[in-house]
Amino acid sequence: MSKLTDSVNGRRPCLAVDDGVSINCCYLRCAAEVIARTKSNDCVRVYRFDAVSAHQSAPLSASASRLTSGTTADAQNTSTSNSPSRVYPHDDDRLQRRKEKKRRKKESRVQLKEEETSMIQSLRVTTTIFHPVVSSPTQNQFIQCMSVAPAMPHPRSIVHVKPLIVLDLNGILCHRVRLMHHPPTQSKSTIFRPSCGKISNTDVIPRSDLQAFLTLLHDNFCLAVWTSATRKTAKLLVQALFPQNVRERLLFVWHRNFCNFVETTGLVGGSGGSGASAHDYRRDTSRDAIPIPVESLPIIDNLLASRLNARNNRSFDEAAKIEDTLLNVHGVRVQDSDRTWFTVRVRMDSGDTTCNKDGFCTASRFASNDAITHVDLTAIKSLSKVWSAYPLWDATNTILLDDSPEKCPRQFRGNALNPIPISGTVTACVVEKKNDQMEMRSVNGDAKDASDDQNPDEGSYSIVDDDEPNQNMQRNFFELLARHWKQSASSRTQNLTEFLEEHANSHNMRWEIGS
């Protein structure tokens, strides 16, 4: 059977058969790395038919044969050079070793290039969902795997992989409370659920069905995490949200350093930016009718820069005081998104920017046509990085789950799902009797459905989870997706794009066909 070998002479780990022939195909090398990282075969399984019986074994490729002969020749040369009967002068011995080293490097480069092309003919990668862990498959199990596509010739190796789900954290698995005060659109009857901890000065409120949701995904898919948070914050969030058995099986945990950043510019109080999310600086909606005086623009600009400087120095109390001054005195509400931002001053007539070397605005006089602007660095998650690092997955078996559509490039929109983000709130409701029927009504007057099985009493209060309908719809979608992948290849009539086109938008996953 195939086994996992450690890296030798600085080379990446690879799968090797019992006869000692290493296979450096990029797919098998990726499979070996995944098995080594997750310490299990829950995500990737490799079936080697040449190790089952002699008559099923395919002949070794020419490059692999040269590898075996080259290894033997190298061993013979090493033993000959180490024997006392063969003695080189000092200079000749060093020159001989250099020539041997150059020759081996050249042969290894040629060999790897040939293997990348020749080994593909004897390898098949399939995507499926498998539950039982097979430690030592028998010949019948190999034949059963081969029956998935009987029309294809018997390959020497089959790699079975689970579909890959790349998860975002904030908005998908939790809600991070960033504002010090409740936004004006939030009613007094709406409160946040209990948090699981405080990370980076934000309360982390997990989704109410977190354990059931992660269990569903872990049992049917290969999971990975890609967040726009910093390295430290990403590590703390993963430890707080994922149970240990799921956390150890994550394919990778990527943070903001793996993202590309695109600049978007907008005005305070305007639409701002090219993305779907609101920009960081926006006017208080209750004071939209009052324009900002021209003489107040430099003061507001300096306050914004001072607040940003205080947050960078982790002086959060000082930053909160400046935020209150901006809101109560100048009517400017500061809302921090999960994007890196800094303020600049843009001359609307000439386009000149005046700011110091740190990106903070200067306190000079400005003309009446100036306006406060900001520059957002939107984190872009390009799936091509994932497919390059892990070639076993591609556009046919990968889904990016992120609540922000602007974070996924347009060419990868066909593999991105943007569900409604988790709000982390509950609503206090009172039960009223109307037309001989019990009806739950929130304190602010919004009607809610009253379940008959609970038999609520008139005048009693109840707490309703605002995220429950959204969470149930997401679980139902991934249950359908799991059943889709469990179908055999011969009976599967839908590919991933057709499945998403039929089911994604009906479950509020906000999917669109990539360009």
Image (cartoon, helix red, strand yellow):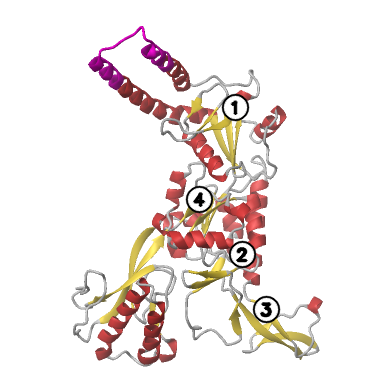
The tag earlier along the polypeptide, 3 or 4, is: 4
The tag earlier along the polypeptide, 1 or 4, is: 1
Which numbered disc, 3 or 1, marks the residue closer to the eye? 3
- For label 2, the SS is helix
Could you tell me the amino acid type at mark 1? Pro
Q: Which residue is mark 4?
A: 252
Q: Quadrant of residue 304?
A: bottom left
Q: Which residue is mark 3?
A: 464
Screen quadrant of the C terminus: bottom left
Q: Is residue 22 left or right of residue 494?
A: left
Give the magenta-colored segment's residue range.
Answer: 74-99
Proximity of marks 3 and 4: CB atoms separated by less than 8 Å: no
| Nearer-the-camera pick, 490 or 339 | 339
- For label 3, the SS is strand
Q: CA distance from mark 1 to mark 4?
A: 34 Å
Q: Point out residue 58 in the picture as x, y percentages from the top left corner.
A: 57, 21
Q: Residue at the spot x=41%, y=82% of the render?
A: 320
Could you tell me the amino acid type at mark 2? His
Q: Residue at the spot x=43%, y=87% of the render?
A: 285
Count every numbered label the image shows and give the total.
4
Category of crowding for the residue at label 3, using alpha-carbon neighbours closer than 10 angstroms: few (below 14), some (14–19), many (at least 20)? some
- In the image, which disc is placed on residue 204? none
Q: Residue furthest top?
A: 85
Which numbered disc, 3 or 4, marks the residue closer to the eye? 4
Could you tell me the amino acid type at mark 4? Phe
Q: Residue at the spot x=66%, y=51% of the render?
A: 219
| Nearer-the-camera pick, 496 or 175 | 175
Q: CA distance from mark 3 to mark 4?
A: 35 Å
| Nearer-the-camera pick, 365 or 472 | 365
Q: CA distance from mark 1 to mark 2?
A: 40 Å
Q: Which residue is mark 2?
A: 507
Could you tell me the amino acid type at mark 3? Val
